[in-house]
Image (tube, rainbow, N blue to C red):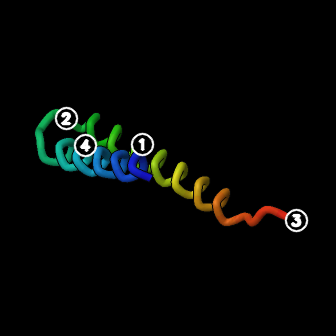
Amino acid sequence: MAWLLFLVLAAVVLGILGATVKGLFYLLVIGVLVLLCALLFGAARLRRAGRRPTR
């Protein structure tokens, strides 16, 4: 779970830097991609954790 929060935080920081600093638009793109990967990873973990083992 810590990795997921770290990835989201990194995506936010990269997105802010990419949006505010002139000429660093690629950081915004990388931030969005990292955020999407983190969300997909988190959704996969939640989906997997929601299943109960059958007896």
Q: Is residue 54 above or below residue 41?
A: below
Compared across the picture, whether 5 is left or right of 48 comes to left
Q: In front of the other: label 1 or label 2?
A: 1
Name the residue: 21% across, 42% down. 18
Whole-angstrom CA distance, mark 1 to mark 3, is 40 Å
**Label 2 close to label 4 by CB (< 8 Å):** no
- Distance between the alpha carbons at the discs numbered 2 and 4: 10 Å
Callout 3: SS: loop
Q: What kind of residue is marked 1?
A: Leu
Q: Earlier in the sequence, mark 1 or mark 2?
A: 2
**In this rendering, which labeled residue sits more in front, label 2 or label 4?**
4
Amino acid at the residue labelled 2: Leu
Looking at this rendering, what residue extends furthest in the right direction?
55
Question: Quick one: label 2 or label 4, which is nearer the N terminus?
Answer: 4
- In the rendered image, the quadrant that contains the C terminus is bottom right
Amino acid type shown at disc 3: Arg
Answer yes or no: do the residues labelled 1 and 3 have beta carbons within 8 Å?
no
Question: Could you tell which of marks 2 and 3 lies nearer the N-terminus?
Answer: 2
Few, some or many residues within 10 Å of mark 2 (<14, 14–19, 20+): some
Residue receiving disc 4: 14
Q: Position of residue 43 (x, y in %)?
A: 57, 58
Question: In the image, which disc is placed on residue 55?
Answer: 3
Choose the circle earlier in sequence order: 1 or 4.
Answer: 4
Tag 1 secondary structure: helix
Label 1 to label 2: alpha-carbon separation: 15 Å
Q: Amino acid at mark 4?
A: Leu
